[in-house]
Image (spheres, coloured by chain):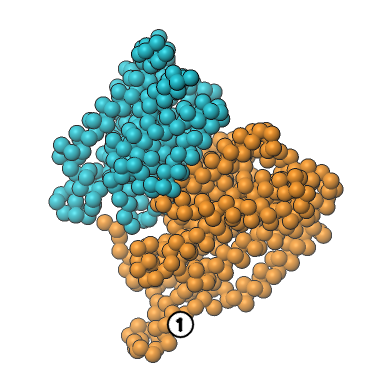
Chain colours: A orange, B cyan
Amino acid sequence: MPKIRSPQSTLTQPKPRRMSSRGLAIESALLLAVLFSLPAWGSAGQMRTIVEFISFLALAQMWNLLAGYAGMVSFGQQAWIGLGGYALIVFADDLHVNMFLAVALGGAVAALVALPTAPLVFRLRGGYFAVGTWVVAEVFRLLIASSTVWLQGGLGRTLTAAVAVPRPERELYTYLLAVVVGAGAVALTYFLVRSRVGLGLTAIRDSETAASSLGVRITRIKLLVFVVAAFATGVVGALIYLNALRITPQAAFNVQWSAFMAFIVVIGGLGSIEGPIIGTVVFFILRDYLSDFGPWSIILLGAIAIIMTLVAPQGLWGILQRRFGLELFPVRRRLPCVAPHAQPALSEWKPAATDPALTETRPD
Amino acid sequence: MGALWVNIIAQGILLGGLYALYGTGLSLTFGVMRLVNLTHGDLIVVAAYLALLAGQFLGLSPWLSLLLVVPALFGVGVLLQHGLLNSTLGRGVLPPIIITFGLSVILQNVLQLGFTADTQGLDAGPIEVASIPVTKELSLGVMPLITFITAVLILTGLQWLLTKTKLGRAFRATSDDPTTAELVGINSRQIYGLAMGLSLAIVAVGGVLLGVRTTFAPTDGPARLIYAFETVIIGGLGNLWGTLAGGIILGVAQNVGAQLNPAWFQLAGHLVTLGLLAFRPTGLLARTRDVG
């Protein structure tokens, strides 16, 4: 039998230390200032690490948008990484588009392909959706691998346009682009989740049937999120291969990408913007410490994800939040009656149709 | 030319028997508890490795090793369900997906540590290459025939179990409505454990037959999971004989694809699956409905 948590537990939560929108804006501006000025005072190694960190963060953020907010657990996100990466090379090398612009086009290609893919995989639910999206990614991998002349099949291709740009310059632009992409991915999730779409998403995740009966346009919202996630994942895919310069279907369409996204989100905390950030930090620490242990590092990562799912399904961020009432990104809508410090005690609380306390507060 | 295609389709049909064995287990756990076990493919590979160990250490032939591997995987299934999955019941779709996917990643890497990435095979003696000539141009391999007949026998047995026995009634009742089933004294958690055990027992047979038929490696699991998934999707959720039909269609599609271009073996199967999803999303012979 499922345990029913008493309503008391929400009343005795610590006073939320919630960041206001203005606080968030100031802190984000400071962080961005540090990141954008880093090339002036940081090392090339630091820049590379940050590019990699941002790539994983943005990927995890999109996976979280699908799984944590829309209830679509996908193991086929590598499809968009691969398509974004290959689109970058085709646009930059074959069509001679500026390669930084080609990164954005990588996202556009992923989104365009995601559009007809969505109705197909939406026919599947839960675990079958996960495998179905994976099959779609496999189809793209096999198609690209069988283009032996144009895309050089399993051998893969090299981004030759990048050779023309001197390395320091290329690394600088890649870094700046990565900061924009990372900030964009977080901001996109933040504003999407705070919008009406976000409300609809949460309703869908909790119960599609109930959401639909309340007039939430399920298919439209799911389609929007699926395509947006594909776009952003495609951009990140292009960014990854702008950095790596060499792409093979085997590596780009590897399910390991989705595995990492899932593990990062589950460890950090599903259904929050802070969770993937913490998850990515943990992922990087683990990876650095365990890089000498080969397969053991991934075994440990899988084990941690399983343990977190069993013991702390809200992830590390959930633990922190319950403990300290932290909230960096104010996206949650609160019902005033469960926040005793902000409202008169329940005994004094007078329900009235016009009582402003009864209307839900929008995130501030 | 005609004989060539007859041969290819015949081999594809027989290959479908193996896929039916893969799909049946996946279909069973989904049917009883709406759970998709993402370690399914890796456990097929684990079964093959267990048979390999039984041969190396106990000198058992692959056929005799079934006596150990089938109960072992049944036990693994019961343990998996009671130890990890039952505690996630009622917590949405994500926990079982993450747990079984995490296990899949762990198993692949553990196998790689224990057995290296080299491919292995099970040695069943001359039967592996034996074949029965049907006509002048068409001859059928004995092993693929045994696999196909095994699949039919297992499906018949499962059909009997589900429709004629008390346990089968409990399975079906839990599938329809676990809460109501509990009212009449069925312990749904126990039923889930048995369903997972049974699913993996069938996986064990599939894994050993795979090992005799061809080589296997630690990272082969995901492809096997995908074949099982495709078999179920083509055949229709929750229909046992649909699973056999799904396996046959997948096997034929893969063999025909490979004949056209050696690189299209997997691709043809994927495209048939996605095509079916587009035009007949319930599969050919669906029975279980996924509510909620």
Name above or below for residue B78 compared with residue B16.
below
* Displayed quadrant of residue A253: top right
Residue under mark 1: which chain is it in? A
User: In the picture, which quadrant includes the N terminus of chain A?
Assistant: bottom left
| Whole-percent x, y for residue A54 in the image | 65, 55
Amino acid type assigned to the residue bearing label 1 in the image? Ala
Q: Which residue lies furthest to the front in this view?
A: B2
| Whole-percent x, y for residue B1 in the image | 48, 19
User: In the picture, which quadrant includes the C terminus of chain A?
Assistant: bottom right
Q: Can residue B198 be seen in this view?
A: yes
Q: Which residue is drawn at 15% across and 39% down?
A: B166
Residue A147 versus residue A43: which sits nearer the camera? A147
| Whole-percent x, y for residue A211 in the image | 38, 67
Residue A357 versus residue B269: which sits nearer the camera? B269
Name above or below for residue B59 compared with residue A168.
above
Residue B173 versus residue A109: which sits nearer the camera? A109
